[in-house]
Image (cartoon, rainbow, N blue to C red):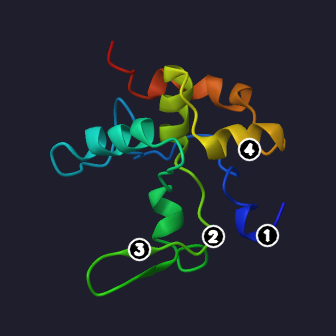
Amino acid sequence: MSAPYQNMFKLRRPCANCPILKQGAIELAPGRVEGIIDALVSDDHSTFYCHKTVHNGRTGGDWDDDGNYAASGQESMCVGAMIYLEKLGRPTVGMRVGRVLDMYSPDDLTPHFDAVIDPAN
């Protein structure tokens, strides 16, 4: 696996203030969490990076003057988002490739399933 993707699945549990948590989530603008989930579910080629790897001098990419983000390739996928998608049975293409390449296992995430919001029925 090339170096830019080595960090994509290195995290194994949601951050303490992951926006996808049932309790303790960072407060986002109204509808933002639903928008993140809708984007991930409607486009399985997409990803949602962990905020702690985006806003990090070592792993984060660049923001332009218009607020657009250019990824560095060193970010990690948000584990809360991964767990949500696993619970839904809708992992992204990247997650499926990560499984095949043994970069992560859904079993690594199951201990944290109860902490992450549940998919709507």
Label 1, on which residue?
Answer: 3
Measuring from the top left, give residue 93's x and y in whole percent. Answer: 62, 42
- Most distant residue in the bottom direction: 65
Q: Report if residue 20 is visible in the image.
A: no
Q: Quadrant of residue 74?
A: bottom right
Q: Amino acid at mark 1?
A: Ala
Image-based side of 57 in relation to 103, left or right: left
Distance from Cα at disc 1 to Cα at disc 4: 14 Å
Q: Residue at x 49, y 61 (%)?
A: 52
Label 4, on which residue?
Answer: 98
Q: Residue at x 75, y 33 (%)?
A: 105
Label 3, on which residue?
Answer: 69
- Which quarter of the rendering shows the C terminus? top left
- Earlier sequence position, callout 1 versus callout 4: 1
Q: Are marks 2 and 3 in contact (CB under 8 Å)?
A: no
Label 2, on which residue?
Answer: 73
- Earlier sequence position, callout 2 versus callout 1: 1
Q: Report if residue 9 is visible in the image.
A: yes
- Earlier sequence position, callout 4 versus callout 3: 3
Q: Residue at x 42, y 45 (%)?
A: 18
